[in-house]
Image (tube, grey):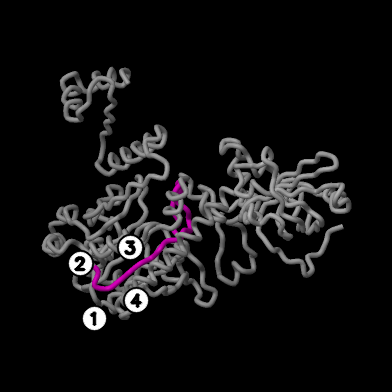
Amino acid sequence: MLDNLGNLRRTKTCGELRVEHTGQKVVLMGWVARRRDFGPLTFFDLRDRDGVTQVVFNEETAAEAHAKAKEVRGEFVIAVRGEVVAREEGARNPKLETGEVEVQASEVWILNDARTPPFQLEVAAPEALAAEELRLKYRYLDLRRPQLQAHLRLRHRVVAEIRRYMDEQGFWEIETPVLIKSTPEGARDYVVPSRLHHGKFYALPQSPQLFKQLCMIAGLDRYYQIARCFRDEDLRADRQPEFTQLDVEFSFATEEQVYTLVEGLKLGDEVTSSLLKALGAETVARVAEDAGATRGDAVLVVAGKSKVVAASLGALRNEIARREKLIPDNSFAPLWVTEFPMFEFDEEHGRYYAMHHPFTSPLDEDLPLLERAVEGGETDLLGKLRAKAYDPVINGVELASGSIRIHRRDVQRLIFKALGMSEEEARSRFGFFLDALEYGTPPHGGIAPGIDRLVMVLAGTDNIRDVIAFPKTASAADLMIESPGDVDPRLLEELHIQIKE
């Protein structure tokens, strides 16, 4: 029979007890991580989010509690009352912060029982973990692992420090809408049908971009938000369909001011046979000379379009660094990437796209090129325009994207035109914003560090799912709640939506 909690109160957590607590009477509550039965002595490792404490049930001193402890199994939820005692010299556990003490239990309450988990929660090495798909299905069990809880504790502390720092810098935390208008430029939107407006749809925000710029037009001067964002795009180990970012915008900003703000937040031979055959001995010798390579060195060569080559070599460099452990643990090498191209050409669609987003300002000295490209028909000049854009990178991981924004309507009109938008299309998509630009918009800029990625780097993991409480798989599915799923046909009828096979 299970016990009721009643008025029983926890006095210490399972990670608090130290030698200085010896002799104190305490009440601990948590989950039974391990149980070891030695006849008249029964040992539990009692776990909560703060740590683990060893609890001892002795048949001689507490016969009733000892007998009851025999009923307990792994992952049962229990409460114990007892005295903190120092462990004997040879029985101390240096792997535990509480390893110098234990609790000699006088009473035990069984608050809930538990089925045997579908996988082992505590393992000696990461490679011994159960398959990730199984752990995602039972995420509420996987989250009991100390490593994942440590990641979430780190995430909490990062966000708490961000809020403290941003308040200190004079920023206001302002919430922006989640149900917004779809603006198809860049990644695909998640759309939400409206019941009250037949045939119309909301979109979930890919970022609060326009709203934070409107905050600047409104004279709010310094805005930030711990923002939830959504993108319906193909996933990778460092991407999720819904993610969290620190969204920042402030008026009269320069690139250097943004940098200062962010930096203040303390947070073989066979290969050489193939090259000779393909390039010839003279070319190989020249490549080796240019690279400063000698016999025994490896020179990696990738040929193709510049965008593909840059992405391929970047991924290869990061993978080699990871495999060869070239980046020491707890070592962080931050840098800024600046002056991005304003546009990139998409050969499949035969048009230019904004490399960051269409609200990024060109460099002041490149504005004449923009006018010539758009008004003079010299479209090739679009590929030469540089943006007031900047991305911070740590250990090869892009952590944020930011830029100085366009604050003049005439420049914004030229950018929309360069992207192939007619006046009517620009008006339909962004009319409210174009109107707002006419009411005294200050120069402004900002940045949006990804909190998930930042914590991933700080935690030393290469999988973003390790630092999100309830992540989705690479196919954007939630295996635990079986989402996405079907909806009631009556709801589809109310929304006037018909599913075609």
Q: Which residue is mark 3?
A: 447
CB-based contact (under 8 Å), mark 1 and mark 2: no
Mark 3 and mark 4: span between their CA atoms?
14 Å
Judge left or right: residue 324 versus residue 153. left
Mark 1 and mark 2: span between their CA atoms?
19 Å
Q: Residue at x 22, y 66 (%)?
A: 254
Viewer-proximal residue among 120 and 182: 120
Q: Earlier in the sequence, mark 2 or mark 3?
A: 2
Q: Residue at x 19, y 52 (%)?
A: 383
> Mark 3 Cα within 10 Å, few/some/many (few <14, many 20+)?
many
Residue type beneath disc 4: Cys
Q: Which residue is mark 4?
A: 215
Mark 1 and mark 4: span between their CA atoms?
12 Å
Q: Position of residue 349 (x, y in %)?
A: 30, 51
Judge left or right: residue 293 versus residue 469. left
Q: Position of residue 242 (x, y in %)?
A: 48, 58
Q: Which residue is mark 1?
A: 440
CB-based contact (under 8 Å), mark 3 and mark 4: no
Mark 1 and mark 3: span between their CA atoms?
22 Å
Judge left or right: residue 290 versus residue 117. left
Up/down of 490 relative to 90, above or below: below
* Element type where label 4 sits in the image: helix
Say which of marks 1 and 3 sits in front.
3
Q: Earlier in the sequence, mark 1 or mark 4?
A: 4
Q: Quadrant of the N terminus?
A: bottom right
Q: Position of residue 181 (x, y in %)?
A: 41, 70
Magenta part of the chain: 231-253
Q: Which residue is mark 2?
A: 414
* Element type where label 2 sits in the image: helix
Determine if residue 401 is in view. yes
Residue type beneath disc 1: Gly
Viewer-proximal residue among 243 and 436: 243
